[in-house]
Image: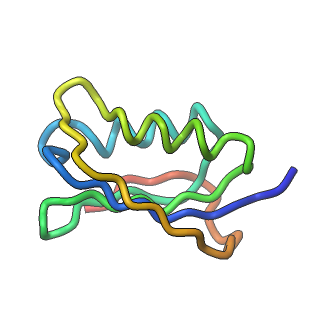
């Protein structure tokens, strides 16, 4: 199974609404490793590595967000998998 890596930048009402912990649960559900963190500009960054077959479903969950979030924009960038992550962690 091919592993892919993606960087997602999520903008909107995504801080202070449990978005990072929502992303962590979604990552566990889709066998994705990496991290999620708040950015100083109010956005949330997600770096994710996982099976290609699960990445689109993970992205769709990030685009929906948790109940209290308002996702206005989701940018996606392909990366080369690093293989350095063993779990999905919440930062800052």
Q: Position of residue 3 (x, y in %)?
A: 76, 58
Q: How is the image coloured?
A: rainbow
**Residue appearing at x 55%, y 63% in the figure:** 6
**Viewer-side residue, 84 vs 67:** 67
Quarter residue 43 falls in: bottom left
Q: Residue furthest right?
A: 1
User: In the picture shown, does residue 12 fall above or below 25?
Assistant: below
Horizontal arrangement in the rendering, residue 76 relative to residue 69 (left or right) = right
Depth check: give the residue in front, 20 or 41. Answer: 41
Q: Is residue 73 above or below residue 63?
A: below
Q: How many marks?
A: 0
Left or right: 65 in relation to 29: left
State the image coordinates of residue 39 (x, y, percent, origin top left): 21, 66
Quadrant in the picture for the C terminus: bottom left
For the point 62% across and 64% down, the residue is 5
Q: Is residue 57 left or right of residue 40?
A: right
Residue lying at 14% horizontally and 70% vertically, measured from the top left: 40
x and y percent of residue 80 in the render? 67, 75
**In the drawing, does residue 21 fall left or right of residue 39?**
right
Picture coordinates of residue 18 (x, y %)? Answer: 23, 37
Q: Residue furthest top?
A: 67
Identify the residue shown where x is 65% and y is 71%: 84
């Amino acid at each position: 199974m091919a592993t892919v890596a993606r960087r997602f930048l999520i903008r909107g009402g995504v801080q202070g609404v449990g978005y990072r912990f929502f992303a962590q649960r979604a990552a566990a559900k889709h066998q994705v490793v990496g991290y999620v963190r708040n950015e100083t500009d109010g956005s949330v960054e997600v770096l994710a590595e996982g099976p290609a077959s699960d990445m689109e479903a993970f992205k769709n969950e990030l685009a929906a967000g948790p109940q209290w979030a308002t996702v206005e924009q989701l940018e996606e960038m392909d990366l080369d998998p690093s293989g350095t992550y063993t779990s999905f962690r919440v930062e800052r």
